[in-house]
């Protein structure tokens, strides 16, 4: 059972930056995708970014050019660098690992973009 622990959320003004981190409790092979999702109040959870070995990262169109996903396999950690944040980026952000057809989720970290 993989456990995922996120950190790095908070309150930031429009145009600001945050970096989210997610660390897994066990080794995640580089071929296994690690992803960030988000869920805003009253909306469905949506994929923000995904990274896996041998392929370019995938991004939601609205975050392309502002967000960057990366991973450190030695630390079993995936990051989401978020720049030029907008109010519509406000949501709970969740880390996800899908391994063997099973989805593992972190507890979520709140990101609020407001002046």
Image (tube, rainbow, N blue to C red):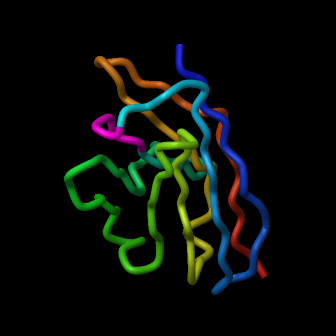
In the displayed structure, does residue 70 sit left or right of residue 23? Answer: left
The part of the image, by quadrant, that contains residue 103 is: top left
In the displayed structure, does residue 61 sit left or right of residue 7? Answer: left
Q: Is residue 33 above or below residue 83?
A: above
| Extreme residue in the front direction | 74
In the displayed structure, does residue 72 sit left or right of residue 52? Answer: right
Is 27 included in the stretch rendered in magenta?
no
Q: Position of residue 53 (x, y in %)?
A: 27, 48
Q: How many dots with numbers?
A: 0
Instruction: Pick the quarter of the image with the C terminus.
Output: bottom right
What main secondary structure does the magenta stretch of the protein show? loop
Q: Position of residue 87 (x, y in %)?
A: 62, 74
The part of the image, by quadrant, that contains residue 19 is: bottom right
| Rendered residue at 58%/78% (across/down) | 86
| Rendered residue at 44%/31% (across/down) | 28
Q: Which residues are magenta?
A: 30-34
Q: Position of residue 70 (x, y in %)?
A: 45, 59
The part of the image, by quadrant, that contains residue 4 is: top right
């Amino acid at each position: 059972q993989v456990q995922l622990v996120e950190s790095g959320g908070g309150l930031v003004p429009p145009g600001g930056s945050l970096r989210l981190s997610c660390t897994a409790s066990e080794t995640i092979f580089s071929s296994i995708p690690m992803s960030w999702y988000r869920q805003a109040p009253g909306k469905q959870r949506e994929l923000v970014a995904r990274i896996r070995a041998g392929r370019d990262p995938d991004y939601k169109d609205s975050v392309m050019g502002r967000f960057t996903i990366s991973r450190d396999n030695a630390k079993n950690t995936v990051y989401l660098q978020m720049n030029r944040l907008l109010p519509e980026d406000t949501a709970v952000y969740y880390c996800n690992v899908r391994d063997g057809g099973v989805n593992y989720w972190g507890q979520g970290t709140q990101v609020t973009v407001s002046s």
